[in-house]
Image: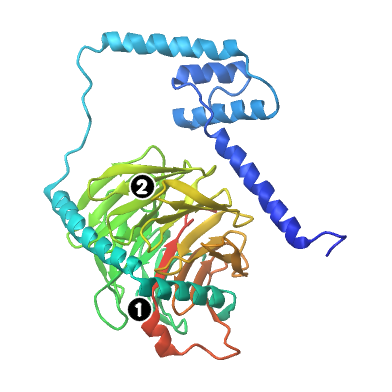
Amino acid sequence: MVDGRNPHDAKWEEQRKTVEEHEWQRKMRQVPVPVHDQTVRMYLRRWKEPVTLFGEEEMERRDRLRRCIAQRERDGNDLPNEWMEPHVAYERDEDETMDVDRADPPEIFYTVGCDDLERTRRKWAVESLRRAKQRIECETDERHRTNKRSARALFEQNARRLVLEHSQAAHRRPVVGCSLSNGGDTVATCIWDGTCRLWDGNDLRGKTTFAAHEERCTDVRIHPSYRAGVDGPCAATGSSDGTAKRWDNRGRNLATYKGHTDRLACIAFHPYGHHLATTSFDRTRRLWDVETEVELLLQGHSRAVYALAFQCDGSWCVSGRLDAVGWVWDLRTGRHIHTLTGHIKPILAVDVAEDGYTVATAGEDHTCRLWDLRQRRCIYTLPAHSSLISAACFETKQGGTLLTASYDGTVRLWSTTTYACLNTLKAHEGKVAAVAVAAEAALVFSAGFDKSLKRWCVDREGERPNASWTKRFVMPRACVGCTNRE
């Protein structure tokens, strides 16, 4: 007790106020504003606001007007009704004029996909159904559910006992990407000077270092089928030069994917390993055949696309944009099937749990939201950090624990059943850029702007976890985020 107050109550009161503030800002984003840019400019001029800012586009100008309206309502200043009437009449008259002038019926715009894309979607449809059937059969098996509950309880217990085991000065500049192999024995990192490095996951010994790009590296992902000690495709990197590249374990360039007109933000391998997705500040996400280097899909967005994650069955993916909106896409049809709205600032990290329906989104508003796509809604909002969240990932197939990394220098582990914080790792002296986890072995890897890579393991009274047990049961999840933010 401090001054007669319970510190625990004070903490939850602070979280409650934070959630209320975020909820108000979420409602602010739902304030209706005029559609036509001339009307938007008219209201900004009436309210003595700048009509336009340098580099401001129409969508950004509408957002600025929305903030002005919401702030006036919050301050108790009612909006005069006559101010809203002119733009309604103006837009109605303009729409009627456009209808009269339009002689031909509107045509549906679409881009014809290539034959390779059609064949790929057919393969995904067949294989994703097979995987979904296996997953659902496991979920309905009582023994599997019992084992799942036990595994969740075990990891939550181990999460509370994580301690720092290894720390490496990884590079000379900030480490902005971190990815873990399926075997758990290889870690890949990327850095702003354009280099990429492979590490031994057991003791963080450096394996291979290669110059991946001439400009900044922004993301790195290890191929789903890569195994340490076996020559072959190893990892992919993204860069500020607008290209993505694929590498083998000896640092030889296997393929280069060109097409983006601005820097890349995120890359991700499809679960089957035959395709690579890239997102960029050029407001597109693209899908590539990793072998032929052919661009199969180009999907445009209204804002920059920053984060992307695939569902475990390979049937859909979720993308996070800098306009604070997440989009869910059916990969088998190419259609947008759901929108995730609720964040009040850009989304910087997304991940999908292995249960196939739980999605985590996190970003600059310091919160992490959990979504149940079966219910098509947000089931909980975590006021997770005191600064922007740069990465978020689920720890295991069970999805019982969520990890978040932040610019406040910490990595936090959360229970997805009770939503309690299991542990706070004071990971780095500066900003944490990326986090990866080997779930069953309870190993966490973090990378940050202090130029270091760190390995966290369970405190077993000074005894290091058995290496053979670690290699046998490692099932990694990794998320790399916020690689382009200062």
- Residue nearest the viewer, comparing 384 with 364: 384
Q: Which residue in the rendered view is the most extreme toward the right?
A: 3
- Image point (55%, 15%), residue name: 84
Q: Is residue 32 above or below residue 182?
A: above
Residue closer to the observer: 82 or 399: 399
What is the quadrant of residue 197 in the picture? bottom left
Residue 301: image location, x then y, percent: 36, 40
Q: Quadrant of the C terminus?
A: bottom right
Q: Which residue is mark 1?
A: 183
**Mark 2 residue type:** Val
Q: How is the image coloured?
A: rainbow
In three-dimensional space, the C-alpha distance between marks 1 and 2, rounded to whole angstroms, equals 29 Å
**Residue 180 seen by the camera:** no
Indicate which disc residue 328 carries. Answer: 2
Regarding residue 160, the answer to whether it shows in the image is: yes
Tell me residue 216's x, y (percent). 43, 59
As drawn, is 22 to the left or to the right of 39? right
Residue 376 against residue 419 in the figure, above or below: above
User: Mark 1 Cα within 10 Å, few/some/many (few <14, many 20+)?
Assistant: many
Please state which of residues 387 and 392 is positioned toward the viewer in this rendering.
Answer: 392
Viewport quadrant of the N terminus: bottom right
Q: State the residue at coordinates (63%, 19%).
A: 48
Q: Which label number is shown at residue 225?
A: none
> In this rendering, would 6 be left or right of 435?
right
